[in-house]
Amino acid sequence: MFNTFKQFENFGHSLNAPGYHIQARTTEDIHSAFELAKKHGLTVTARGAGRSYNDAALNGGGIVLDLSGMNLIQSWNPATGLVRAESGVTLEQLWQKVEPDGWWPPVVSGTMKTTLGGCLSANIHGKNNFKMGTFGEHVVEFTAVLPTGAEVTCSPKVNADLFYSMISGYGMLGIFTSVTMQMKRLHSGLLTVDAFPVPNLRRHLFALQDGAPNHDYIVGWLDTFAGGSSLGRGQIHAARYLHEGEDKNPQETMKLKNQILPPYIFGVFPKSLLYQFMKPFANNLGWSLVNLAKYVASLRTHTFRQAHAAFHFLLDYVPNWELSYGRGGLIQYQSFLPKETAEAAWTEIISLSKKRGMPSYLGVTKRHRPDKFLLTHAVDGFSFAMDFRVTSSNQAKMREMLFEFDRIVIANGGRFYFAKNSETTTETALAFYGEETVKKFKRLKKRCDPNGLLESDLYRRIFG
Amino acid sequence: MSDSTRSTPATPLTPRKRALVIGASVGMGATLSRKLAKEGFALALVARQKDKLDALCAEINADGEKLALAYPHDVSKYKEVPALLRKITSDLGGLDVVIFLAGVNYPPGGMDKYNFENDRQMVEINLIGAMAWLTPIAEMFQNAKAGQIVGIGSVAGDRGRVGNPGYNTSKAGFHTYLEALRNRLTRHGVNVLTVKPGFVKTEMLKAAVGPTPFAIEPEKAADDIYNAMRKRKQTVYTPFFWAYIMQIIRHIPSFIFRRMSF
């Protein structure tokens, strides 16, 4: 088994944790992996595309069960928009299957490389969280294997407690094998997008809140280098689906070739090399210039039409962009705050990051609504994601700063998202989930996994 | 299975290298373990003497952070190795560095006192013990395309001498084994470092027969080893000047060397 040992990383390349790489193609393989773990006294973690920014799909020294090979779309009904697929199917496979028939996944992440199992585990949200909720809200049914060996089918009606806890459960309760989901009808391959600037944080949040009801998607870019009266300035992109008839030729715009991101820029330069040219900018000065230039460019208010794939999958636009952050990699710090306290909390957080000389290089804001899933990260409010570059010299200082951020967020009734934040402690998780939720989760864990076979580095960090 | 023996998982802002030290309880092993703990490594310490191992772990962990975990094990129990290695790797949350310095030295103490039992034990622990551990470790590191193997050999392995044939053989064999590992693993991104200490003031030295020139404190040896690890060197002597001394000794022609008394 030592010959399966492999180095695994997170999406931000900021952590490595080697483990035994076992590939699953069938449900049988999942059972065997649990048997193998039992035999050798090891633990198992499910891994899809490895797109979590931290340790959700890492299991240092244990078995990493790779589900990316369980990637069949089992059935697709273009009349009803109902799709059933194995958990290793990626969003890329899914949208390319359904889009030409005039459908779109109701919730997608910023990268299309994620697997459905990963999307369920983190219960991801998109730029339409305020309207469509999370990924899990569109699941009709899923099947999973529990570490006890049981194969379960869960829906909002059947095994509802498992349904609402395994979705958002980060693979800590069982391993998804298939999912049945409802897609969303399209009347065009294009969205109409309004882009406009916002001069400060108050106007920024107001625009997100106010713009949400009239749009299907809304997302803000926040200039993390601006301070003083301009703190929180940025640009809002608010998009809506085209209504029936608005697109004169929907058959054409929905064709795959009009959606797929081109691998070249200017028609000749391979985008796979682009990240190399971003490297020289991966420092405080470089990114402050990038942010300034971006703000100046955003001052023009305009409306345009954009293909779905281009609008949603910004993270795939520059392949390997995360490598431009250098050897230490990058981490994300995303906080979710109620609409009443967000402005005060983020003013404090942005000011603090500037004061400490560790500004975030990229800030993204979204509008959210609460959901019923057990380990939910959502609130009736907003989220603000910050990218930080990790270097060997800033680690200790940055950790201290992030703990200060945590205190500010908790004091303001906020929450965190395990797919993003890597430094959240057991105490912080307890503070925002509340004792009741943690107890309930641990009871479920005991029921689904009495021998403690399913463990990730994330599990041990938060619940271990 | 989760139990209290696991190290705290690393995070991007508290990264931690994970090292396995085999032969950790006394002498150079203990000193090097203290040094690595100070440098922030998470440690799995393997040695035969449980009480000494526990004391060392308690000392390293006294500051509150659980950096060192103890695994009592007799290196000559080869069959125990794979299961123990799996447990250690799981407890540490991975493995970056392995340092093998388990070793015994039973000098005959006289030209008429050669003893097969002693020689056999030296080879069984110093050489075959190392092979038992480094075989699965090499397989892991080769597949992970990362890692570092540090073998503590000896200047005594550079030539066969009158006074201690068993020890010379065990260390010479170990050097050759490490060289073979290096030639196999370098292309997979794994560093194999051979350390050849001269005389180091440890328990082992007290048993030495004859003069022990230029003896150094184990702290000095640990510093040298750590620096060589950081620079991912191939072979180092500690202290460095043994490289020159051994260069000369290695070139003494046999017709002279076989008439000498050391």
Image: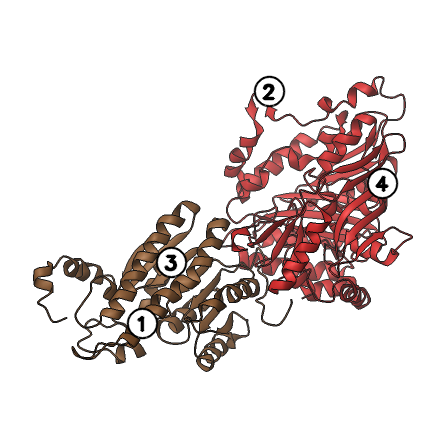
Chain colours: A red, B brown
Residue at mark 1: chain: B
Subunit under mark 2: A
Identify the disc placed on residue B226: none
User: Which label sits on residue A210?
Assistant: 4
Camera-nearest label, 1 or 3: 1
Q: Quadrant of residue A422?
A: bottom right
Q: Are marks 1 and 4 in contact (CB under 8 Å)?
A: no
Q: Which residue is mark 2?
A: A267
- C-alpha gap between disc 1 and disc 3: 31 Å
Which secondary structure, mark 2? loop
Residue holding disc 1: B120
Q: Position of residue A313 (x, y in %)?
A: 70, 35
Label 4, label 2: how far apart the Cα atoms are: 39 Å
The residue that appears at 74% across and 40% down in the rendered structure is: A220
Q: Chain of mark 4?
A: A
* Residue that appears at 68% across and 46% down: A67
User: Can see residue B132?
Assistant: yes
